[in-house]
Amino acid sequence: MKSANVQPCIHPDAHVHDRKAFLREVAAVCNERGLRLTPLRERVLHLVASAERPVKAYDLMQQVRDDKGVVAPPTVYRALDFLLEHGFIHKLESINAFIGCHQPRIRHSAPFLICDSCGRAVEMENEQAARVLEEQALILGFQPSAQTLEVHGRCARCARAS
Ligand SMILES: [Zn+2]
Ligand SMILES: [Zn+2]
């Protein structure tokens, strides 16, 4: 993620946390930026947003197929690429799954907490860690092109349950 795109987190209240608000926000951003939210892109976005846990491309393909008949996998990948490229969803590299973003309007890099017990993931609405890493890399003359910050462990709910 380019540093020019990384902006400080605004107040959490400005983030969208419910699915409907999220889908509305993405539609509004697409409209403003002249991006085409095709029915398939919208469907994939909807599925990612509706999932309680990060979803894998394979599962998305199954779901899209169920209600649309045969859909070629590359079409689903292209829809995911579009959503990723514009910052509407994030890809969790360590589990190879996708999750909706709480701040689809602003391009950013934020750490994720991933629970290995229940599979839920939370986006930490704090960009300090990403910024520190980027600054340190630049000091060393390293030019970062991508950043993956994923912390694995057990969420509070799972930790309490055991
Ligand atoms: Zn995000
Ligand atoms: Zn958990």
Image: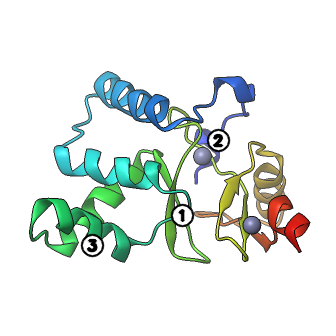
Element type at mark 3: helix
- Residue 131 relative to residue 42: left or right: right
Badge 1, how many Cα within 10 Å: few under 14, some, many 20+?
A: many
Q: Which residue lies under the disc numbered 2?
A: 6
Q: Quadrant of the C terminus?
A: bottom right
Q: Which residue lies under the disc numbered 3?
A: 62
- The numbered dot on residue 54 is 1
The residue nearer to you, when weighing 101 against 147, is 101
Q: Is residue 29 above or below residue 97?
A: above
> At 32% across and 31% down in the image, what residue appears?
30
Measured from the top left, where is residue 3 in percent x and y?
64, 46
Mark 2 or mark 1, earlier in chain: 2
Mark 1 or mark 3, earlier in chain: 1
Measured from the top left, where is residue 26 in percent x and y?
40, 34
Quarter of image, res 23: top left
> At 58% across and 54% down in the image, what residue appears?
1
- Residue 79 relative to residue 67: left or right: right
Q: Tell how many labels.
A: 3
Q: Is mark 2 within 8 Å of ligand 1?
A: no
Element type at mark 1: loop
Quarter of image, res 29: top left
Badge 2, how many Cα within 10 Å: few under 14, some, many 20+?
A: some
Measured from the top left, where is residue 156 in percent x and y?
85, 60
> At 27% across and 57% down in the image, what residue appears?
79
- Residue 32 relative to residue 142: left or right: left
Q: Amino acid at mark 3?
A: Gln
Closer mark to the observer between disc 2 and disc 1: 1
Mark 1–mark 3 contact, CB under 8 Å?
no
Q: Amino acid at mark 1?
A: Pro
